[in-house]
Amino acid sequence: MIESQVRGRVVVPAMVAAGPALLVGAGLLLFGPAGLDDSYITFGVVDRLLATGAIANYNGDPVEQSSSLLHVLVLALVTVVTSLPVPVVGLVVGVLFGAATTVLAAVLAERMHPGSAVPSSLIVGTGAYLVHWSFGGLETSLAAFVLLLAGLVTVRALERGIDTGVLVAFAVVVLAQTLVRPEAGLVLVAGLIGTGVLLWRRPDAVRRVAVLVAVAAAVGVAVALVRWGWTGYPVPQPVVAKTGGPMLEAAQRGLTYADRWLLPPFMLVVIAVAVVGAFLLRGRRPAVEPVLWAFALAGVAAAVFSGGDLMMAGRLFVPSVAVLGLLAGVGFTRAAERYGRRAGAVLAVVLIAAQGLGLAQTTLYDSAGQPAWAPDLVVPGAPAGLDPPWVERRNRVHLRDAAFIPVVSAEIDRLRAKLGRPVLVGGGQAGMVMRYLALDDPDRLRYIDTNRLAGNELAPCDAFTAHTPIGAHLSYRDWMASPTRCGTPEPDLIFDLRPVRDELLATGRYVLVHEQADPVLPPGANVVTGTERVTGQFFAVRTDLFDGELPNG
């Protein structure tokens, strides 16, 4: 018996480690550096913080252009410690927190139902959305980890009571949760309230939940006040830009978002196993279970009512889906114990097939990264000698931007020499291109974002904007119809994606100077590399600044 216990202490942790190992392996094999260029909006804030010690946007103004202040602080700290480039740090941090999420899921699952650590770790570690976004450079895997950590501290408070140490730990976790995503603080408060409702028959637990709700609310209000004093808004700038539209339209978009990302067959299998597991419990339900269900449902509701977003692989659902994967691991264990090994084996096959389907579907249809077996893409007409680092070369969006940056940068230098002042640059692409333009020389330009994610210069034209998941978008048609009404001068140069080129040129105020070709596979390659389509970019200069350059394409 003693030998069996020793063996269990070794084997179980080793099998739990398979969860993070599978996450890292699947990510490297299937996705590489995934995601879109939105991560570079955050990287731009990190650059400013490291250079000046202040949270500021590309222009150096007190604007919180990143949605995740916690992510900014973590990236800045790791960059200082390692001296690695910020984009590399972004990838490494994402992967580490993705792996840590699978381990924390195992800890919570084991606490919820002994024997559930391994299946929960494996399910969470092979979840397509978490794997993809762990390699996406954004705060997504960090948000999943912090939500599970908040669940763990909450369970500790409910099971053992609230003392000074617990309150301090909970306050720290609440602060992290509030800063990791704009909606995350509300998710925590709603999840706590839901926990209180589910535990209504336990008066002591309800009283403890009430204390935790008060702490969470106090921290959230304090953060909002500090933000208000620094930037003039209680929330990050992307939230200012994306909210303000009709609530019914946002909810309808959110339901469409849920249908797209929560109802594919591979997700329905995980959800079904989690739900069935909840009904298989005999006896008193541990506090951890209502906490996790309440947190998961609160996260889903927040994503739906916010209207979702336009990124791939269910990004806003990742924290909730990680919790659901944990619960599915518990459900699997309970089903195997209730119905025997044969039923457990069948269910294991179903879960493995579902997870494999999810990874395959995300690879084929929803990723901008290049799987390990695919060749590097090429950008026709790219500058000679272009050789971006791996984190940018193996992503179609980043590769497109890397090829575009030298050309537009040279034009900005030309205009600055001509004008003798910083160049006023406009456009709706506030990610990788703008990050490098500002990093090279932040004083040579000022940026006006037509989606108002990175600045609020176009706020006077709010009546002409549409608040959607891409931001407070102002069309070039409406902007150029009367530029002075927006409170800013006309940009000297505008760069954007090719689909809006004709809209800008139709105003008659700008001349096309450069148009970029789409990234393509090298000749002879016959590899399915995903269907996240990438369109080229262009830039145009104001007609009075055009000195005879011939447009090219």
Image: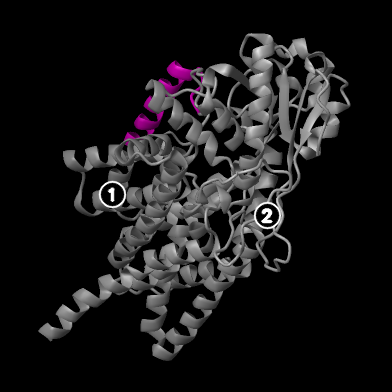
For label 1, the residue is 153
Q: Quadrant of the N terminus?
A: bottom left
Q: Is residue 236 above or below residue 374?
A: above
Q: Tell whether 78 sits left or right of 301.
A: left
Image disc number at residue 430: none
Mark 1 neighbour class, 10 Å CA radius: few under 14, some 14 to 19, many 20 or more: some
Frontmost residue, 207 versus 66: 66
Q: Residue at (71%, 11%) from the top-left corner?
A: 489
- Among the two numbered marks 1 and 2 on one chain, the one whose residue lies closer to the N terminus: 1
The spot of residue 74 in percent (x, y) is: 36, 39
Image disc number at residue 532: 2
Magenta region: 214-235
The spot of residue 356 in percent (x, y) is: 54, 73
Q: Is residue 146 above or below residue 218?
A: below
Q: Quadrant of residue 278?
A: bottom left
Whether residues under marks 1 and 2 lie with C-beta atoms below 8 angstroms apart, the answer is: no
Q: Amino acid at mark 1?
A: Val
Q: Amino acid at mark 2?
A: Glu
**Majority secondary structure in the magenta region:** helix
What distance separates the C-alpha of mark 1 from that of mark 2?
Answer: 39 Å
